[in-house]
Amino acid sequence: MRSRATPGRTSSTCGRGPRSSEAPGEKETAVTTTEPQTQTQTETKDGKTVEFYFDVGSPAAYLAWTQLPRLCAEAGAALVWKPMLLGGVFQAIGNRSPAEIPGKGAYLMRDLARHAARYGVPWVRNPHFPIHTLLLMRGATGFLMHEPARLDAYLGAVMRAMWVEPRDLNDPAEVVAMLQSAGFDTAAVSALATRPDVKDRLKATTGEAVARGVFGAPTMFVGDAMFWGQDRLDFVREALGA
């Protein structure tokens, strides 16, 4: 199987609940010491792929992001990035973040800390959670579509700001500071994130996720087999035959 850098399907070798008011199709009103790499891959040995539906506002998606590139590299699989708007998924299917449920939310935070320790990656609960991620996910979609070589740097900056530092990325000034500190031209990123084709692609990927049965993040597909949660990576590895 061949994986090309088409919109929404850039591949590489190698939670769950941001806030959003947009449903699919509605009008819109990290990090490890060595960060994961997202270089474009054109081909895999066995045609194996892992499709990774994610939103940067999900702490579980952050943890999966730190692990999937290496997992895919070891399995000889392509990692296909699928940035979606998790708030749109929730609105479309009537779901909500586990973090909003008393007891369950507290347990989730402890469990995320346990997994971060197991993976050997930094993770800090963001006191500003939930973060409105529409513009951030448009940015991820824009880099995926038009500047895939810079997707790694963009995701690294956002994930680090969200789950390591952590910053209030609901504040536009904090977003600007985050981008500038990572060497991005903020005006160029803003222009990229507001392109009509980028908006349409994010809506389409979010709708695609809903159609495939996605209800949370992260969600991974190996073929037709769906795996939800960063604590299901062993099953992803098993599905790849690694």
Image: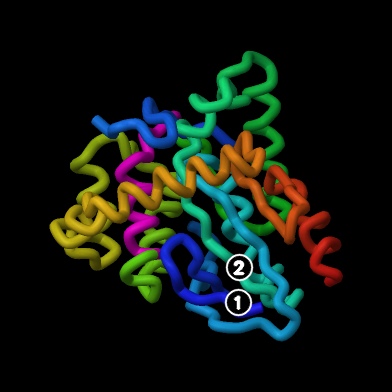
Q: Label 1: how many residues lie within 10 Å, few (<14), some (14-19) or many (20+)?
A: many
Which residue appears at 52% of the width and 33% of the height?
89
Q: Quadrant of the C terminus?
A: bottom right
Residue found at the far left of this picture: 187
Which residue appears at 68% of the width and 33% of the height?
110
Which residue appears at 64% of the width and 63% of the height?
68
Counting residues from the start of the chain, the first of labels 2 and 1 encountered is: 1
Q: Amino acid at mark 1?
A: Thr
Where disc 1 sits, the SS reads loop
Which residue appears at 83% of the width and 62% of the height?
239
Write the start and end of the magenta stretch as one range: 127-144
Q: From the viewer's perspective, is residue 195 above or below residue 215?
A: below
Q: Residue 139: horizontal and vertical position, in percent?
A: 32, 54
Q: Quadrant of residue 70?
A: bottom right
Give the residue pinned by disc 2.
79
Give the residue pinned by disc 1.
13
Residue 56 is left or right of residue 225, and the answer is left
Residue 45 is marked as none
Q: Residue 209: horizontal and vertical position, in percent?
A: 57, 44
Q: Residue 80: horizontal and vertical position, in percent?
A: 57, 65
Q: Quadrant of the N terminus?
A: bottom right
Q: Residue 125: horizontal and vertical position, in percent?
A: 52, 36
Does the image show residue 231? yes
216, 60: nearer the viewer: 216
| Number of marks in the rendered image | 2
Q: Label 2: how many residues lie within 10 Å, few (<14), some (14-19) or many (20+)?
A: many
Where disc 2 sits, the SS reads strand
Q: Are marks 2 and 1 in contact (CB under 8 Å)?
A: yes
Q: CA distance from mark 2 to mark 1?
A: 6 Å
Q: Amino acid at mark 2?
A: Leu
Q: From the viewer's perspective, is residue 62 above or below residue 188?
A: above
